[in-house]
Amino acid sequence: MNPESTEMEFTGERFIPTEHGKIRLEHYHRYAMATEIIRDKEVLDVACGEGYGSFLMAALARNVTGVDIADEAVENAIKKYSLRKNLRFQQGNARLLEFPDASFDVVTSFETIEHLYEQEEMLSEINRVLRPDGVLVISSPNKLVYDRELSAKNEFHVKELTFEEFDQLLRGRFTAIQYHGQRVIAGSIIKQLQDVGNQLLVWSDDGERIQKSTGSLLPEPVYFLAVCCHEPALLPNIRSSVFYPEDIDLIRQNEITIANLASTLESVIEDRDARERGVEQLKELLTQAVALEEQNRASLISVIDEKSTAIELLQTTVRDLIIDRDFLKSSREQLLITHEELVLESEESRRIFHETIKALADDRDASSAELRDLHTAHHDLSTHVSTLTASLAELTTEVGELRACLAITEQQLNMERAGHQAAEKMLCHILKSRSWKVTKPLRFILRIMRGDFQGARRSIATFLGKPSSDAPQIPVAHQVQPAELVTPQNASLLATTVPDKHRILLVSYYCPTRAHAGGLRILDIYHQIRTHHPDAILELYTHARPSIDWEYSDVNNIFDAVHYSPAEELSPHYFQDLTGGLEKYDVIDLQFHNSADFLDQWREIGKKLLFTPMESVARNLIIDMSTALRGKGGITLRKLLASTKAAAEEIVFSSKADQVVCVSRTDASFLKLLCKSKKVTYLETAISSLEFADAIDSIDTPLNPEKKDRAIVYVAYFGSETNVVALRWYLQQVHPLVLEKVPDYKLQVVGRGDLSEFSPFASDAVELVGEVPFLAPHISNAKVGIAPSLGGSGFRGKVNQYAIFGVPSVISRNSAKGLDYQDSIDIFVADVPKHFAEKCATLLIDDKLNQTMGEKARKKAISLYSWESKLAQIRNIYSLENA
């Protein structure tokens, strides 16, 4: 050992050789037991700790490798035990051993398994690196005895085992196992548990009487040791043994002598008449004790001389080694650099804080000016805003008051909606009246006189029965059969000729196309319904936006009839004009927040009303307000008012719908708590069977990350503020750190929306791809996918899209909510910019880790997040169980 090494401090988490007593006997005895089978073998010591055990085994083994998760323990072992050339240490995780398959003859792991929750993963990794004829020697504390013996709970043990649990874990991977029990009784005893032939006589004292027992099992062993291999013929027979310190006999003799002296002194005191005789006896005993002590001292001096000789030898060897002083110097320099970086980060944080304060002050000044203007023009409105602001301040502490305000808002909305409906009916009556038709030429002349030529052109076009040039072009109705177009007339015929069919009407504020994630989700759900329930009648009522919808082939193939509203407002009146007003539906599916504006009117023709808000605006409002109150962001008064109105509407819609379907488990839990309703459920977005059919079919295709460029892809819809904030955070705080570690890496930003804000970042390292017809090529060609969400929802679909192509992800904790991926197993989770950048760089550089995590993520995505796995949920939501 290295005499100049610094001993580690004993914390209770791992054994340090400077500790004495029972713990020393227990730990040294286990390694002594292992030396019976390691001669000339390749040995792996898992969780080697300080390294003393690996050092002891290296005296007999061909090579010994010590692995421990703690950097400080590995550094100490390297410095302290560098004497042996066949011994090496490295940092590593017992759940993911970085060694090739079948690398070792013997694997030892003492007092490790109880420190881990992932005990199955640890044993799987050990089994993988162990050769077919190899042997595992492993120990575990006896859960039923250990804590009682210790008189206190070991804070570092997370999952202790009984013998049955220990045996069940090992039997899952090894067919031949030899068990031993260990207990310290003056010395450490390790006894075979199955050795029936060699009975052990045990005397015990319970405080009242001495009892005798015999048996092959060591009474209440504190620890279990197992010797495991794959074939009974290969199982070594390790004998029962005892381990005791070298000076135990001297200690016992001193104890006997001291006991005799005490007994003699007591006799002398009690028998005054025999005092002189007792004094002589005492002198004789003292003489014997002195002689014995001199003998003991001579023995100890001999032992000390032997140890001194060994120390001199070690010192001579150490003097021949060159101490690397540059390491300390570089460590100091690195600490200085880290200190400077922390100072810079602190200054940057301070600068951002001051800028945020200034922005908040500017916002406050602007809001004050706006409020003054509003006060001058609309005093009543200002009073209402003040009341609403006070209510919002109380929202963070009393949810009950929010519900009261929202109930009032609901009444107001109902009154406004009733007024709108009355006005709309009156307007329809006027438009259909004879006087309106008679005065049409006069209105045309008045438009010409006012210079409203566009209105005049629309009037002419309407009069001639032709669409004007600036009117939105509505796609023709989709086909029910190849030779028959669906018109309002034959759509009504369809309703009357098949009355027993299960009828579903989808009312979608945005036309469901592949142009955006919400549309693709709807297409996938209805594709599943069409595939598994071909007799169901599926109809769509939406508004066409040709400039952003891409193409309509998917809705043509899935829906029996498609009705396009002439306005974005999806009014039931327009729908009845298009269809003749004869349809009655089993389910009406209101997708997106705005689709539920006429929920009460839809109930007249629908048995069951579904409401899918896509993203809970009420939850986002709470998050924005909490962020603003913590001083980590701002929110304008105008946005606050708009969000509050939308949140109130969402709660009203949720209370009136027969079932509320959220796209995430988090949104569903929030709305269920806020509305106190059991009607809220969730249907998480799965991997699109339309968009990614080829990737799903080629699930067994090998991944080759080494053949890819070092590219990171970020797929999102950048019309959403949540995605824009996430991209801004990554480019400003994470991207420079990744570029430092991987200078040749490139970020690709893919998705529809306005990316002009980020044009200053465009470079060789940042490509603003924007909207693309197909996502598959951009995801499959990347090495890493990211989802750096700081709030909101909708990121689970992106993570699953990355996973289906075997592209490992680095995501924030918010993005990971509701997903069953495991951090550091099949995905990386990080929120701090430095850590996020480190995970990205690791996956860009380490192709082996990239492939391992990508394969695990791909398997989990298929098993848990395909639409086929959610078919039972879809049937329940859309009442298709008996259809």
Image (cartoon, grey):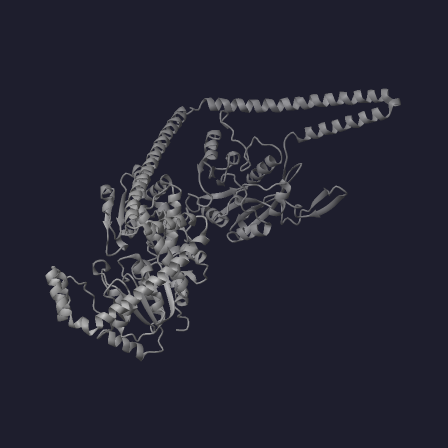
Residue 454 located left or right of residue 205: left
Quarter of the image with the C terminus is bottom left
Image quadrant assignment for residue 458: bottom left
Does residue 192 lie above or below 302 as drawn?
A: below
Point out the residue furthest to the right here: 273
Residue closest to the far bottom: 497
Q: Is residue 193 left or right of residue 45?
A: right
Q: Nearer the viewer, residue 858 or 235?
A: 858
Please tell me in which quadrant of the rendered image residue 871 appears: bottom left
Q: Position of residue 133 (x, y in %)?
A: 49, 48
Residue 865 vs 140, above or below: the answer is: below
Question: Who's the residue at 80% across and 25% down the image?
Answer: 265
Q: Is residue 516 or residue 605 the one in the foreground?
A: 605
From the top left corner, tell me how far across and down residue 700 is, in percent: 35, 57
Q: Position of residue 312 (x, y in %)?
A: 53, 22
Image coords of residue 74 (percent x, y):
46, 34
Residue at the spot 27% in from the left edge and 54% down from the top edge: 775
At horizontal 24% and vertical 76% (from top left) the residue drawn is 489
| Residue 769 in sight here | yes
